[in-house]
Amino acid sequence: MTIGFTIGKFAPFHDGHKYLINKAVSEMDKFYIVVYDTPKFNIDIETKIKWIKDEFPDVKILKAFNSPTQYGLDKESVEIQMKYLSNIIKNISVTHFYSSEEYGKYVAEYLDIQNVIVDKERKKYNICATRIRKDVEKEKEYINKKVYDYMRKLVI
């Protein structure tokens, strides 16, 4: 059985995320999404989970609270992040990690699973959540109406 997972802040959830999850769901027997709590972005975790579940009702969601603040691809940062993530996915026999990011290889290596990179060059959907947070009007084509309405409230 193939069991994949991805991680993310999903702040906000956009078409690039949907593309990655669609690919993973079509290839895996089971798929998990680790959703990080991100208080600094003013988008609560339950809202982000609802956005994902509205699109993908069959995926399994794992909540990630109080994540380490040390980020980076250096050995120490990777070790800190991987210990945290390993605790969240414990008892799940994952076989594949899906992402569009450089850190995917570190996650897969640490867990000794297959790394699946999806649209790393952003050719299918040239978007990231940071750009949406900076200018929701300019980037609204990449988010659905519910996400757009929520993000507009944050900006106003």
Image (cartoon, helix red, strand yellow):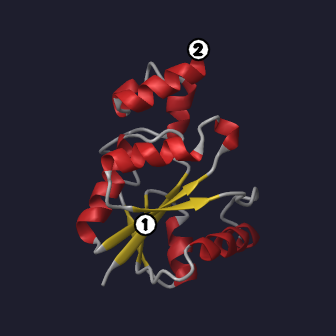
Q: Position of residue 75 (x, y in %)?
A: 71, 73
Q: Is residue 26 above or below residue 140?
A: below
The C terminus sits in image quarter: top right
The N terminus sits in image quarter: bottom left
**Location of residue 148 by image quarter:** top left
| Residue sitting nearer the eye, 19 or 119 | 19
Circle 1/circle 2 CB separation < 8 Å: no
**Residue at (54, 81) in percent of width and height:** 111
**Residue at (54, 20) in percent of width and height:** 153
Q: Position of residue 18 (x, y in %)?
A: 34, 48
Q: Tell me the amino acid under the disc marked 2.
A: Ile
Query: What is the secondary structure assignment of the residue under circle 1?
Result: strand
**Location of residue 36 by image quarter:** bottom right
Looking at the image, is mark 1 or mark 2 earlier in the sequence? 1
Residue 103 seen in the current view: yes
* Residue where numbered disc 2 is placed: 156
Q: Position of residue 104 (x, y in %)?
A: 50, 67
| Residue sitting nearer the eye, 69 or 32 | 32
* Residue where numbered disc 1 is placed: 32
